[in-house]
Image (cartoon, helix red, strand yellow):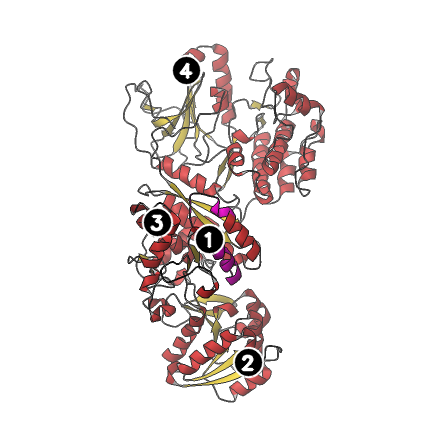
């Protein structure tokens, strides 16, 4: 955006002008703010063009037609005055990139994104066609991407269906490469109907899926000839969408589906997952642009400030009153300017952008935890990038490792190709964390693990002085503590342990810990189950013979924990039962059924609904990801949110030290810095602050209630203990770096 010039007005029709979005032969497009605070793209036509009766008549028709444009996926006209000396028109402003820019920056889009994109655009066109209008210029440059969906812009050559064209009769209507064959035939302009928009949408879908125009590039005449006479190149279009795209690109308009049919064929575009439609990288770009626009100061007054009535007429404000900014510098830009608005930083604040890699499982066996981490990290990054006082911008680069160590290693190598990479977060398993850390260590890029529990000796190159892998969670051995604390607080001192030898050294180790520190200072009896059997009945029978007041399953298998629970229920035990995080999974609930009710689990993640200071986070998370107020926040989401903000604080410290390699400097801060970070759920400390009691920090107790795990299972929160980089002191007041 460029700053205003002295010859520009300071305000117009109740809008305060903030800067220039673009200029052209027809006029100027301004970024403006209404008296209610809404941002708008305001187009002001030069007086010499307005003096042409034919031009003004076409503008008047367009303003009238704009009143009929509605729908969620189009930019609405906020106001217009075709009768002014210099006619103007204001549309909603969207700071997101166009589809053309997104594909240029990120390449072809994934099929789920294209399905959501196409369904929403088809819905917009269906509404347009129902209103009797035809867009006639559906192309990637006229599609803007917002966090909640695309916006169709530029209705400058739209016309009422069945009416004569508003443009000159000897001019080709539309954009070569995306126009329909009937549009390419100049003399047939009056025959252009809704089917032409469907053809253009088919071109857009092919372009988004492949990154290439279906009728190629080159001279306009060559592209138009191929559009009219040759078949499109759809070799790279996925088989699942090929029939639909092919139908949209039929030469005969009568053979094409309607916009509503296209929408229905692409599948639903609403629901909880609808907000998560963009591929990695684009949400961060949108957030950056949104925050830059929202941070704009009021422009200095310019020399000209034309008078305007205090009470504008209805025509002057067709739809004024829309609140907030939505995504898209659109409206009738091409019609007014005959070219795309130029880029430029103008008077914007230029900040360094640092990349944080998110290497996690989004499609494999641990995808639930991977997606939760991604959601928490995205929310934290978007919140940070929206701050006016931020010292730098954050860009998240998300890579799906599918829970596969080989893919994790490959993903880490790909992330290292980005020179702005400073840290990576998000592995979900021990093997993927180890594989990624082994790659990142050579460049001293830190990796933060929130979910897995890794023996630091399994990762090469780790020393007390030079560490690149950091676990932002309590140790796996500490997971027995919350239930043990519950038994102690309720003075339940006869504990029976079912030691599941299928868990190997882990079950033996935690069993020894329970023996050495029995709950309530009482007694512990141990009853083993061999790894090669699923029959828990004998061990349970022996355990119940000791008349226990509490029973522990020491193992890591959700299925085997469920079999233990069923055996206990079958033999009549109704006392408190507990286990550890690894055993708490969907399979435990599915296999155990009613026997799961009342079980306790010690975990390294927090239920933010039980943390008084987390209300703002839980509200923002549910709104951002479409969760109902009664739905629990995903596990590891608040920990991910905190981890990113802790990383931001450490990055601030690293940048103040003017380090040449920010990744290595960040690892050094995580290792040795004395400053704690106070998060929403807990506090975080550097490795050098490690103490023996830190293993207890960040622990929570969960209880199965009505078939659902719920936090705050009745014991004093484990995260009230002092801790370090593995956990927290808390819950302290929430704070954002």
Q: Which residues are magenta?
A: 414-439
Q: Which residue is mark 3?
A: 651
Mark 2 — residue?
Answer: 568
Which numbered disc, 1 or 3, marks the residue closer to the eye? 1
**Residue at image coords 55%, 38%:** 107
- Does 434 lie within the magenta span? yes
- Secondary structure under tag 2 reads helix
Left or right placement of residue 443 versus residue 400 in this view = left
Q: Outermost residue toward the bottom? A: 545
Work out how far the residue at label 2 is from the one at label 3, CA to CA, in angstroms: 51 Å
Position in image of residue 479 (x %, y %):
44, 71
Residue 82 lies in quadrant? top left
- Residue 481 occupies quadrant: bottom left
Identify which residue, 332 or 606, lies in the foreground. Answer: 606
Residue 519's place in the image compared with 158, above or below, is below
Q: Is residue 292 visible?
A: yes
Q: Which of the marked residues, 1 or 3, is nearer the chain's N terminus?
A: 1
Distance from Cα at disc 2 to Cα at disc 1: 46 Å
Residue for badge 4: 46
* SS at badge 1: helix
Which mark lies nearer to you, 3 or 4?
A: 3
Mark-to-mark CA distance, 4 and 2:
83 Å
Q: CA distance from mark 4 to mark 1?
A: 57 Å
The percent position of residue 647, horizontal first and vertical second, equals 37, 52
- For marks 3 and 4, the one nearer the N-term is 4
The residue to which callout 1 is attached is: 440
Q: Is residue 477 left or right of residue 141?
A: left
285 lies above or below 19: below
Could you classify mark 1 by the number of other residues whose Cα lies within 10 Å: few (under 14), some (14-19), or many (20 or more)?
many
Q: Nearer the viewer, mark 4 or mark 1?
A: 1
Comes first in the chain, label 4 or label 1: 4
């Amino acid at each position: 955006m460029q700053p205003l010039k002295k010859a520009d007005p300071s305000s117009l029709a109740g809008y305060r002008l903030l800067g220039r979005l673009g200029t052209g032969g027809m006029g100027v497009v301004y970024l403006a703010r209404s008296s209610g605070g809404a941002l708008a793209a305001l187009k002001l036509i030069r007086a010499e063009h307005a003096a042409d009766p034919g031009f003004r008549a076409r503008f008047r028709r367009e303003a009238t037609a704009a009143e009929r444009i509605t729908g969620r996926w189009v930019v609405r006209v906020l106001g217009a005055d075709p009768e002014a000396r210099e006619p103007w028109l204001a549309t909603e402003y969207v700071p997101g990139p166009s589809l053309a820019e997104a594909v240029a920056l990120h390449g072809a889009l994934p099929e789920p994104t294209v399905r959501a994109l196409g369904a929403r655009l088809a819905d917009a066109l269906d509404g347009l066609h129902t209103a009797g209008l035809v867009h006639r210029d559906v192309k990637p440059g006229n599609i803007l991407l917002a966090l909640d969906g695309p916006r169709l812009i530029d209705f400058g050559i739209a016309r009422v269906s069945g009416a004569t064209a508003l443009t000159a009769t000897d001019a080709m209507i539309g954009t070569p490469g995306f126009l329909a064959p009937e549009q390419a035939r100049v003399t047939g302009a009056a025959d252009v109907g809704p089917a032409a928009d469907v053809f253009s949408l088919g071109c857009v879908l092919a372009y988004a899926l492949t990154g290439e125009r279906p009728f190629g590039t080159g001279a306009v005449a060559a592209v138009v000839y191929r559009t009219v006479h040759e078949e499109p190149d759809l070799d790279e279009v996925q088989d699942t969408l090929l029939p639909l795209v092919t139908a949209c690109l039929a030469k005969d308009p009568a053979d094409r589906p309607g916009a509503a049919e296209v929408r229905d064929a692409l599948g639903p575009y609403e629901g909880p997952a609808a907000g998560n439609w963009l591929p990695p990288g684009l949400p961060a770009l949108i957030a950056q642009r949104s925050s830059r626009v929202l941070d704009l100061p009021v422009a200095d007054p310019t020399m000209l400030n034309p008078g305007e009535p205090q009470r504008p007429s209805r025509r002057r404000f067709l739809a004024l009153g829309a609140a907030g900014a939505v995504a898209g510098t659109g409206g009738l830009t091409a019609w007014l300017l005959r070219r795309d608005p130029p880029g430029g930083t103008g008077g914007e604040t230029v900040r360094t952008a640092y990349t944080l890699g998110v290497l996690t499982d989004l499609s494999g066996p641990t995808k639930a935890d991977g997606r939760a981490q991604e959601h928490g990290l995205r929310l934290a990054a978007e919140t940070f990038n929206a701050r006016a006082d931020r010292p730098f911008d954050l860009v998240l680069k998300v890579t799906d490792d599918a829970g596969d160590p080989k893919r994790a290693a490959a993903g880490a190598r790909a992330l290292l190709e980005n020179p702005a990479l400073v840290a990576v977060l998000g592995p979900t398993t021990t093997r993927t964390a180890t594989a990624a850390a082994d790659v990142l260590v050579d460049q001293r890029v830190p990796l933060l693990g929130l979910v897995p529990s890794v023996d630091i000796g399994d990762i090469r190159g780790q020393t007390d002085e030079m560490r690149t892998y950091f676990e932002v969670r309590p140790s796996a051995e500490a997971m027995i503590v919350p239930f043990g604390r519950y038994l102690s607080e309720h003075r339940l001192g006869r504990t029976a342990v079912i030691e599941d030898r299928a868990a190997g050294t882990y079950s033996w180790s935690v069993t020894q810990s329970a023996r050495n520190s029995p709950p309530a200072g009482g007694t512990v009896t141990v009853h083993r189950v061999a790894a090669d059997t699923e029959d828990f009945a004998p061990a349970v029978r022996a355990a119940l013979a000791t008349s226990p007041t509490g029973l522990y399953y020491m193992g890591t298998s959700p299925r085997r924990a469920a079999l233990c629970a069923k055996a206990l229920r079958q033999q009549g035990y109704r006392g408190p039962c507990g286990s550890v995080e690894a055993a708490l999974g969907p399979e435990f609930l599915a296999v155990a059924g009613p026997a799961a009710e009342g079980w306790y689990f010690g975990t390294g993640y927090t239920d933010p609904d039980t943390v008084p200071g987390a209300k703002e986070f839980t509200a923002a998370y549910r709104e951002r990801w479409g969760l109902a107020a009664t739905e629990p926040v995903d596990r590891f989401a608040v920990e991910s949110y905190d981890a990113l903000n802790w990383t931001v604080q450490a990055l601030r410290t690293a940048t103040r030290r003017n380090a040449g390699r920010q990744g290595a400097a960040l690892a050094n801060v995580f290792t040795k810095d004395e400053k704690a970070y106070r998060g929403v759920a807990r506090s975080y400390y550097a490795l050098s602050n490690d103490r023996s009691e830190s293993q207890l920090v960040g622990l929570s107790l969960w209880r199965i209630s009505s078939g659902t795990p719920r936090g705050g299972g009745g014991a004093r929160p484990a995260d009230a203990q002092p801790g370090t980089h593995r956990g927290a002191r808390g819950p302290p007041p929430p704070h954002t770096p």
